[in-house]
Image (cartoon, rainbow, N blue to C red):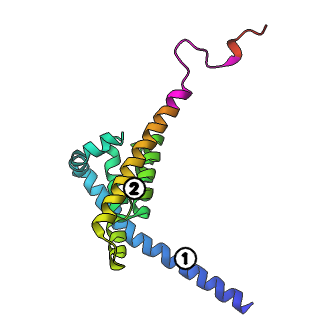
Amino acid sequence: METVLLLLKEGISGGVTSILRIALYLIPVMVLIELARHFNILEKVSVKIQGCLRFLTLPKEAALPLLAGMFFGIVLGAAVIIDYAAEGYLQKRDLMLIGTFLCINHSVIEDTLIFSVFGANPLVILLSRLILAIVITRLAALLLDYLSQKRRPAEGENKTAAGRSEA
């Protein structure tokens, strides 16, 4: 029984410590993001990466979630993405494409530094991840667009089979 209580105590203690660490990291960044919104920094940033967003067929509102995930990692990127989705800035399609991009190209500074310590070429890591993320995200956008067009009935067609007569 003593072992179970000790494990429970350690589990709760470790969980609370992890939550506090994440909060200490996320809260200041979320405050900075709100300040960036207030001072229209998002507009300035989205103009800088507009070509890339256009190629990926993403709206300008996707700029900050993409950059947050790329430079600060999946946890912070997810927090920003969830916030933007809750406020209605991003559609389901946008969320899918942002997620696809960030699965391949997240936390670029931290990951690049870690792999560089083990002898990897940082330029090769950065460029290969970025190019792969752009290509796969663009292919995903084409696939999503193709599937959404395929689901729409052609003009003049009935959406259901109820309008058909049985012989």
* Amino acid on which the number 1 mark rests in the picture: Gly
Determine the residue positioned at 26% across, 50% down. 42
Q: Would residue 7 appear left or right of 149 to someone viewing this image?
A: right
Is residue 91 in view from this perspective?
no
Q: CA gap, disc 1 to disc 2?
A: 23 Å
Q: Quadrant of the N terminus?
A: bottom right
Q: For residue 117: magenta?
A: no
Q: For residue 151: magenta?
A: yes
User: What residue range appears in magenta?
Assistant: 148-161
Of labels 1 and 2, earlier in sequence is 1
**Label 2 neighbourhood size at 10 Å, few (<14), some (14-19), many (20+)?**
many
**Label 1 neighbourhood size at 10 Å, few (<14), some (14-19), many (20+)?**
few
Q: Which mark is residue 15?
A: 1
Q: Position of residue 150 (x, y in %)?
A: 54, 28
Disc 2 designates what residue? 80
Q: Would residue 117 appear left or right of 144 to someone viewing this image?
A: left
Determine the residue positioned at 46% across, 34% down. 145
Q: Position of residue 33 (x, y in %)?
A: 31, 57
Q: For this rendering, which residue is in front, 17 or 55? A: 55
Q: Secondary structure at mark 2?
A: helix
Q: Position of residue 138 (x, y in %)?
A: 39, 43
* Amino acid on which the number 2 mark rests in the picture: Val
Determine the residue positioned at 34% across, 40% down. 59
- From this viewpoint, which residue is outermost toward the right? 167
Image quadrant in which you'd find residue 129: bottom left
Q: Would residue 14 appear left or right of 53 to someone viewing this image?
A: right
Q: Is residue 78 above or below residue 7?
A: above
| Tag 1 near tag 2, CB within 8 Å | no
Q: Position of residue 136 (x, y in %)?
A: 42, 48
Q: Would residue 38 appear left or right of 128 to someone viewing this image?
A: left
Q: Quadrant of the C terminus?
A: top right
